[in-house]
Image (cartoon, grey):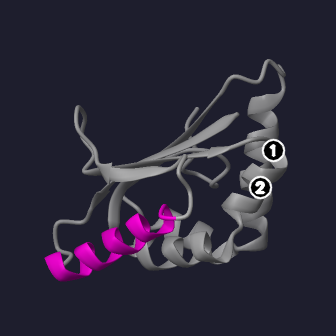
Amino acid sequence: MIYHCIRFTIRPDVPKETADAIVQGMTGQNTDDPTGVFGRDFGGEYEYGAVNAAQDLETYEKMMNDPAHLEVDRMGLPLISKFASFDITDDPDPEMGEKIAAIHQRRFDAHPDLVELIDNLDEYLGSAAPGKHAA
């Protein structure tokens, strides 16, 4: 199982109504997925967080490239100041990290507009985004 986790903070200049609409859109994505959760983030420097589960790498890649996921990224990323994504897995494959990073790289190669949106964030920690990835 792979758990894809994100944490983010909305820019302070974003109107509350706009932020609420994006948050509602993200909340709506989890209605068909009982393994996912989206909500407020406590215990850190982020405002919101989400966790989604995927059985395997194929399911993970489909999730990352789902049109609804891409749409929320395109609407939401311009409103975000700080963003972190990470993955947790119980798969013992020693190359799992590289395989997950390759999925992100293929996603960014296929959708270069996402890289541009990520490059405009104040802070991005995560897989495969040029110049913004975690060490």
Local secondary structure at mark 2? helix
Q: Position of residue 130 (x, y in %)?
A: 64, 55
Q: Is residue 22 left or right of residue 132?
A: left
Q: Identify residue for label 1.
A: 57
Residue at point 69% right, 59% down?
63
**Screen quadrant of the C terminus:** top right
Crowd band around label 2 with a 10 angstrom C-alpha radius: few (<14), some (14–19), many (20+): some
Q: Is residue 38 left or right of residue 108?
A: left
Q: Inspect the image, locate mark 2, and give the three-letter code of the amino acid beneath it.
A: Glu
State if disc 1 and disc 2 touch (CB < 8 Å). yes
Magenta run includes residue 22: yes
Crowd band around label 1 with a 10 angstrom C-alpha radius: few (<14), some (14–19), many (20+): some
* Quadrant of the rendered image containing residue 56: top right
**Which secondary structure is most common in the magenta stretch?**
helix
- Vertical order, 103 against 109 (above or below): above
Residue at point 43% right, 49% down?
37
Local secondary structure at mark 1? helix
Q: Inspect the image, locate mark 1, and give the three-letter code of the amino acid beneath it.
A: Leu
Q: Is residue 8 left or right of residue 98?
A: left
Magenta run includes residue 130: no
Q: Position of residue 42 (x, y in %)?
A: 23, 38
Q: Is residue 44 left or right of residue 124?
A: left
Picture mark count: 2
Of the pair 91 and 114, the residue shown nearer to us? 91
Residue at point 29% right, 79% down?
21
**Screen quadrant of the N terminus:** top right
Residue at point 50% right, 74% down?
72
Of the pair 113 and 66, the residue shown nearer to us? 66
Q: Identify residue for label 2.
A: 61
Q: Which residues are magenta?
A: 16-31
